[in-house]
Image (cartoon, rainbow, N blue to C red):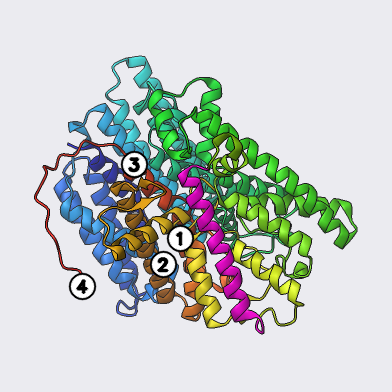
Amino acid sequence: MQSHHLFIQGIILGLLPIGVLVLHAENPLLPGNWSIFAGISALVLVLWGALQIFRTPRLAAMLALAGISLGNFILFFEYQSDPLFTMFALLTSIALLHYFCSGKLYPPIELTGSLQLERMLGAALSVTILTLFSPLFVYESQLYTLAVFIALLLFFLLAYKHTGIIRKTKLKTAMRMFEIMMLGVFIWLYHADFIILGGLMTGLLSMAIILYNKHADLQFLEIIIQHPARGLAITFFLLCIGGTLLLRTPVAMQNELSVLEAAFTAVSASCVTGLTVIDISSDLTLCGRFFLLLLIQSGGLGIMTLTAMALHALGKLSLTGEQLLNELAAPQEQQDIFKTLKLIVIFTLMTELIGAFFLTWGFYTVHHDLPHALELGIFTSVSAFCNAGFFPGAENLAPYSGEKFLLIITAWEIILGGIAPAITYSYLKIQQYRQLPVVSQLILKTTAILLVAGTFLLLLFEWDGIFRDLPWYDKLVNAFFQSATLRTAGFNTVNFALLSMPSYIVMLILMFIGGSPGGTAGGIKTTTLAVLALTFRSAIRGDDKVNISCNTIAQTTINKAVAILISAALVLILTIFMLTATQTLPAKQLAFEAVSALATVGLSLNCTTSLDAVGQIIIMLAMFIGRIGPLTLFLLLLEKQISKTPGYPQIKIPLA
């Protein structure tokens, strides 16, 4: 029996109570009391099926299938009026139907303690998911609160069953008394806010305890380091949740923010994107903008970097974790990985400090207000180096389109953040190296070509367009600034809604490419583009291998470049499809928004605030995938496995 089956069962068990929402639905095909009777029947079938999982799993599957089918029939007309609920309910229903038709169910009496923990972990995750989605629905809060409460009840029932395997009688009695007491507290203090908050805390705390018990021989941070692909997703997800809670605190809000607005802003900051549905200068207090800056800095430096530094300081990082982190940081020469990580942190802070000094001076010459200039200088410096694109002003940097000093300093911070600190450091030590490493040369040449090409093309297509009212030297500076910020900072000094179609296409391409590996930018990376371009050149020449500077690029590197390009393209196509299917905005604006989110750029054609709840959630997912997706895929591809495939004869497949 595989443990992931039990984990999925736990998730399903925790999500089944969402069926109580059918009691709110009105179906014109079921007039009068028939709608209420059908809703109660669907709810009874679903909950009866949930309880029968402990006794007769096959009967439980049949009951749950009947309840889910009846519930979707009742909710059919509700789906047409609430797209957010439609997306959530249909995805849940499809997953449940698929699993009940193909999965295996095991009653707890057949399970060992570790397998019961897997099921409890899934149930705790479901409780957490339900609480996180609770503020997004316009349905009766009491019904959704009831669904969360039932999910908590089922989780405590699983926990009660699990304590039955404890051998020590006193410990078993104490644990069961504690579980009964906690359940009693939830019943006694039954209130929407308490149930949601208590459910969130119970879910998160339970997952942490279960994960710790499953890996008692390892430190939790070490677990993350040993599984970097999984760790990146978990840590950035937790950072987004923590950021949402911080931005929702009274000290952070100047104007009331909805949970979705706070979550969108937190995800955008943590993923260093820059898209926003609020005005951070008026909706957030000074403390709120400080919280936002912390999220940007944490997302820019990378949670894995901070975790590795903490573990190294405590002396608790294993050799395996160090080796995996070496792949993450990708140093250009064989050296101590922690020298590289230390270099990243020091270079980041020093660059931001120097940039803040010059930017503060620049803003002071404009506003003649030192405290205000200091805030703008520090915020812009951190946001620029981390390629975030946030600025505490309603019009971003548009009011400063004529301030050449500010734009040039900001652009160079964007460029330094977009390439790896290790690359910049190798360039500064060129006398010691005598010549740059091949990877450094490749990154710098590709970055320079993209900057020059972007500047030239924007000047060519927008000289009499969006740059029309600027003098020639400001046109040159603004074109250079936009060429830099498109990969992938997200600052803007002009109105992108007035772009010509050729400039629109150029911007899409530059955003999709992004920055360099090891930097703070997103996109498919400059090295991926360079490897693909070199491969194309070799194919045209008829060369068997791809060479650069008396070196041959490994076939595995070429394969990874192709995989990154295709995976990014597939996610982009899916994102555009979902946006065009759910939003009424022009496809041109939605495509630009999708590329900007996936490449973590943050530029927009003034349509972010026009997205409904479904559109904002799609963009949030795109930003999250864009921040961790390509890197996660890269790390997964780096996992060293012994090939079990024998050597087969090569064949040639016609491609043209």
The disc placed on residue 575 is 2
Earlier residue among tags 3 and 4? 3
Residue 172 position (above or below residue 562): above
Residue 575 position (above or below residue 205): below
How many discs mark residues in the rendered view?
4
Please tell me whether mark 2 or mark 4 is closer to you in this view.
4
Tell me which residue sits at (71%, 74%) in the image. 475
> What is the distance, in whole Å, between disc 1 and disc 4 at their CAs?
34 Å
> What is the distance, in whole Å, between disc 2 and disc 4 at their CAs?
30 Å
Please tell me whether mark 3 or mark 2 is closer to you in this view.
3
Looking at the rendered image, the quarter that the C terminus falls into is bottom left
> What is the distance, in whole Å, between disc 3 and disc 4 at their CAs?
32 Å
Residue 519 position (above or below residue 43): above
Earlier residue among tags 3 and 2? 2
Looking at the image, do the residues carrying marks 1 and 2 touch, with CB atoms under 8 Å apart?
yes
Please tell me whether mark 1 or mark 4 is closer to you in this view.
4
Circle 3 sits on which residue?
A: 638
Query: Which amino acid type is marked by label 2?
Result: Thr
Q: Nearer the viewer, residue 431 or 400?
A: 431
Farthest bottom residue? 464
Circle 4 sits on which residue?
A: 656
Circle 1 sits on which residue?
A: 622
> What is the distance, in whole Å, between disc 1 and disc 3 at their CAs?
23 Å
Earlier residue among tags 2 and 4? 2
Would you say residue 176 is visible in this rendering?
no
> What is the distance, in whole Å, between disc 1 and disc 2 at their CAs?
7 Å
